[in-house]
Image: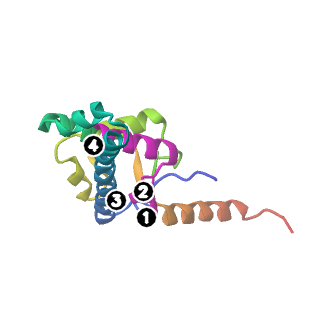
Amino acid sequence: MEKVYVDDTMLVSGGKRFGNYVIDLIIQYALAYGLGYIAVLLYELFEYDSFYNWISEMGKIEEYLLGWAISFVFYSIFEGLLQRTPGKFITRTRVVMGDGCKPPFGKILLRSVCRFIPFEHFTFFGDYSRGLHDRLSDTYVVDINAYEHAVRMKQSFEEIGTTDY
């Protein structure tokens, strides 16, 4: 697919960004609870109690650290491989660089780390709906339909004057 530079018409609204966040957060909670169920299952089936004991005896700090680890891995894998999280799949949005290309994995890791800045999830409600994790990693979240429309427009302008019959 041809590349087009991102402009304000392609950026996703703060409301849609918040929707992405909520959907992804629900899935991350489901993953965390899934770990608990796996621990119980391992304990019940195989009497493997090390993992079960570790999960059941966690303190608040360990719970937060596990949650952060799940979040970091979740965003890094989904955005690193697919440019999209499940929330972005549902809302038809994608993470791109300013020229529309796929961000390098280092930029995705930086995005993932920046999400741990307190209250960062509310920074995309500004004028341009670019969150702090977008600005610090120099990435954008675009509406796929708007971006693909811009690509088609660019291709049609480039075809003007060609003599393909």
The residue segment tinted magenta is 69-94
Q: Are marks 1 and 3 in contact (CB under 8 Å)?
A: yes
Mark sitting on residue 115: 4
Q: Nearer the viewer, residue 72 or 30?
A: 30
Amino acid type, callout 2? Pro
Q: Point out residue 137 in the picture as x, y percentages from the top left corner.
A: 36, 39
Q: CA distance from mark 4 to mark 1?
A: 20 Å
Number of numbered labels in the structure image: 4
| Residue 31 visible in the shown view | yes
Q: Position of residue 25 (x, y in %)?
A: 29, 54
Task: Report the disc number at residue 20.
Answer: 3
Looking at the rendered image, the disc whose residue lies closer to the viewer, 2 or 4, is 2
Left or right of residue 163: residue 146? left
Pointer 1 residue: 90
Mark 4: secondary structure:
loop
Q: Amino acid at mark 3?
A: Asn
The residue under label 2 is 86
Q: Is residue 26 magenta?
A: no
Residue 44 sits above or below residue 147 on the image: above
Real-space Cα distance between discs 1 and 3? 8 Å
Q: Earlier in the sequence, mark 1 or mark 3?
A: 3
Classed neighbour count for the residue bearing mark 1: other residues with Cα under 10 Å, few (<14), some (14–19), many (≥20): few
Of callouts 4 and 3, which one flags the residue occurring earlier in the amino acid sequence? 3
Q: Nearer the viewer, mark 4 or mark 1?
A: 1
